[in-house]
Amino acid sequence: MLTRFIDTFFRHDAAGGIILMLSAVAALIAANSPVAEVFTALFDAKLSVLINGDGLSKPILLWVNDGLMAVFFFLIGLELKREMLEGKLKNPRDVVLPGMAAVGGMALPALIYAAINWSNPSTLGGWAIPAATDIAFALGVLALLGKRAPTALKVFLLTLAILDDLGAIVVIALFYTAELKISYLLYALVPLALMGWLNMKKVHRVAPILMLGVVLWVLVLKSGVHATLAGVATAFFVPLTDKWGKSPLHALEHALMPYVFFLIVPIFAFANAGVSFEGMSLAALMAPVPLGIAAGLILGKQVGVFGLTWLTVKSGRAHLPHGVNWRHIYGVSALAGIGFTMSLFIGGLSFSDPTLMNDVRLGVLLASGLSAVIGFAVLYLAGNPDAEEKV
């Protein structure tokens, strides 16, 4: 009976979002309990991989954020390649509406954060934190609605979130790169070239590509460019079809998905979501960083996603998906404010100061929780999924 329950739970679309939420709650409890010092020390402890004194030496937190999250970005890269070649991103006409929604949902939150933090150069660099949407969490909340959420609405949110992740990857590459070491980038061309050759040969076995991807990860990390981008680059060299017509990309994506969403992302959440409430007051929420993040994710996402969707439809450039009305779009606009994983990740790239990172966690957790509640409530009350509403 227990085995059947566990199997049913992990097959449910909302399972990833639920485990992610539980990991965040566990981090909050750990950060505000008698084991808080042990919790902090665990992720501050250094782990080194050295050969003759040369190699990598990083706190465990950075191994999680730079290493494990590279696997997360690798999966995102596989999904992007599949969608661009044969899925929702293949036909440009199908991308227009969620694409414009994604643009509004990234630009307005960033502008709101920047406006609130404009006079403070030390915090302005976090402008991209509220621009991201958490795919697993947002889709998990939507899945809890069952048949109240039209299938076309799920496709709209998924496409929006994929494009949002693509935008986040571009932002990380352009704006969150440390001092460049050109020599390592030149060395990185070697594994890239070899992966390109293997892709052109349509190899069936992906192990050589993955090993070259690890080499690429080390070289990119040493170059100053954020190492998770190596995961995306490696994914684009995994063949969609091999010389026998089978799909290494589909097989790898399917095999990785449970490990990423049920292990890697929860570990990331546990390592990064521990907000310390010690000495915190209501006034702390009005500090520029948590206020900018919360306003960006809650207000910016709702106005940005809904506003650009409305303008795109009213201008005649696209139509609402079948069975989707404007209340559904508003509900999804609120769910887009769940910025959990990507927002915390970009926050870690933005700030090294523990106090500022605590502010980031506070803003992200508060905004993501409220966005989930608002989005769920709006969609639950949206009525008949097949109803069409004029605006």
Image (cartoon, rainbow, N blue to C red):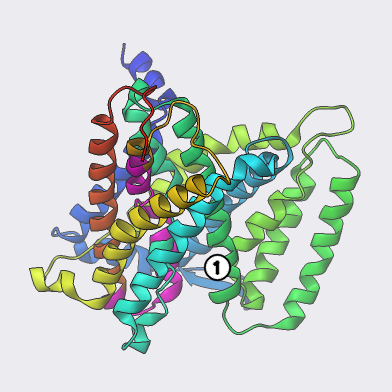
**Is 50 above or below relative to 163?**
below
Q: In the picture, residue 367 is in which quadrant?
A: bottom left
Q: In the picture, residue 366 is in which quadrant?
A: bottom left
Locate residue 50 relative to residue 211 in the image: left or right.
Answer: left
Q: In the picture, residue 21 is in which quadrant?
A: top left
Could you tell me residue 92's position as x and y percent? 68, 44
* Residue name at image x 79 percent, y 48 percent: 208
Q: How many marks?
A: 1
**Which stretch appears magenta?**
330-356
User: Residue beneath label 1, please?
Assistant: 171
SS of the residue under disc 1: helix
Q: Is residue 381 visible?
A: yes
**Is 58 above or below relative to 263?**
below
* Residue name at image x 31 percent, y 66 percent: 293
Q: Is residue 352 highlighted in magenta?
A: yes
**Is 379 above or below relative to 338?**
above
Q: Quadrant of the C terminus?
A: top left
Q: Quadrant of the N terminus?
A: top left
Could you tell me residue 187's position as x and y percent? 79, 73
Q: What secondary structure is the stretch in magenta mostly built from?
A: helix
* Residue name at image x 89 percent, y 32 percent: 243
Amino acid type assigned to the residue bearing label 1 in the image: Val
